[in-house]
Image (tube, rainbow, N blue to C red):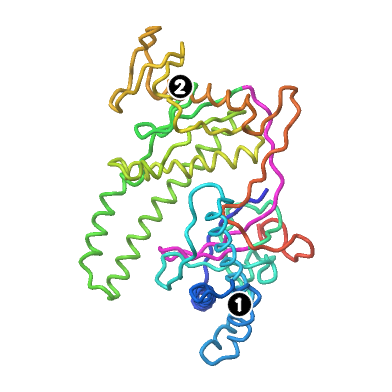
Amino acid sequence: MQLRYNYRAYPDASQRRALASAFGCARVVWNDCLRDRKEAHAAGLPYVKSTELSRLRITQAKRTEERAWLADVSAVVLQQSLRDLDTACKNFFDSVKGKRQGRKVGPPRYKSKKDTRQSVRLNTNAFSLQDDGTVYVAKVGNLKAKWSRRLPAAPTSLTLTKDSSGRYFLSFVVDTEPDILPGLETEAGVDLGLSAFAVLSDGSKIDSPRFLRRAEKKLKRLQRELSRKVKGSKNRARARLKVARRHAKVADRRRDFHHKASTQIIRDNQAVYVEDLAVSGLGRTRLAKSVHDAGWSAFVGMLEYKAVRHGRTFAKVDRAFPSSQVCSACGSRDGPKPLHVREWTCGACATVHDRDHNASRNVLFEGRRIVATGRVETPNACGAPVRRAHVPAQRVEAGSPRKGQTTQTGTPGL
């Protein structure tokens, strides 16, 4: 399975200038190639293949006066930008034809130097891990990194990213074997909510930290100061950076909370079942800010890939399943209830239910039924393991094969 490991990088002034040049050159190649394909489509010409674009927009463009500065960056950066464009086009075509599951994917769009996120992708021909703990990047130099943990295997690709708050990150993708945890007898149904972030079927609750709500007072002041600055001034740029750093701090805290909570749930249960919520739909209601502050989609994604990595069973219960309407004791359906009703009594068996706990128990029962019918991969009735699905990294990587690579396993210098 593929995993992604992110580390903070600290480039010096000259390295920041080199990275800015790499970001700009990758963006120009993307835009030039995308423009050629759009013009060919508008003229009714055949689809322009990547080999032709590589020859015109990279190899020959370096020899022209107006694009001669493309030679100042590594050729791998330019080639990977073209490969990323090919991937974006393929995802769009597959989505239109129905070959790609999930939400519809839009066509590739032009990139701007004012985008909040700038990134370039490299394979092992353009980077390597050094013995002193730095990461060598072609035509950039040795980047200092904050190694929070060791890499489990030699990386196959590296993505250099600059976020809206001005921070630089090194994102490695590695191919590693699953880390199977010892088997357990416990199973858990998880009901996600706003008053409590998650309620498990055993009755335990995970409180909602509400990171954005807690930071709103300071964010309101920073955004008010930003609105008063003259557009295009240096003071406005500094004020915008303060707001971006505050939002980044909130996002980092939320991500850390998600990782800790999801890891604990996966370690304590052999099977985890969760409701498939319509987050995009809830994000258009009056609860939108609280829904996005909770980050349910990111949390469920973490549960899913960690279950595969550690040999656990994971299943999603359909969002149409009436988990809050069914009595978990007798199974009778008592009808829909407004959100302000947190406790209710079953009319059939007179059992008093906590709304969230009852829903989590129903999610557990429905998840067991889904697993029993074989809709997810899990050990069969005889106990024989069934092959689990391959879990890729967060984004499709244009990396390098493991054979013949020169990078080293682990984190040097520790």
User: What is the residue that sits farthest to the top in this orientation?
Assistant: 349
Q: Earlier in the sequence, mark 2 or mark 1?
A: 1
Closer to the camera in the image, 337 or 136:
337
User: What is the residue that sits farthest to the front in this orientation?
Assistant: 44
Q: How many numbered marks have been drawn onto this rendered protein structure? A: 2
Q: Is residue 22 visible?
A: no
Q: Position of residue 225 (x, y in %)?
A: 23, 63
Instruction: For mark 2, give the secondary structure.
Output: loop
Q: As displayed, is residue 183 above or below residue 343?
A: below
Q: As displayed, is residue 129 above or below residue 74?
A: above
Dot 2 corresponds to which residue?
203
Who's the residue at 59% across and 42% down the image?
305
Instruction: For mark 1, give the secondary structure.
Output: helix
Who's the residue at 43% across and 66% down the image?
166
Q: Which span of residues is magenta-colored?
A: 158-185
Dot 1 corresponds to which residue?
53
Q: As displayed, is residue 373 above or below residue 157?
A: above
Q: CA distance from mark 2 to mark 1?
A: 59 Å
Task: Judge left or right: residue 215 versus residue 41.
Answer: left
Q: Amino acid at mark 1?
A: Leu
Residue neighbourhood size for the residue with mark 2, other residues' Cα within 10 Å, grouped as few (<14), some (14–19), many (≥20):
few
- Is 159 colored magenta in this rendering? yes
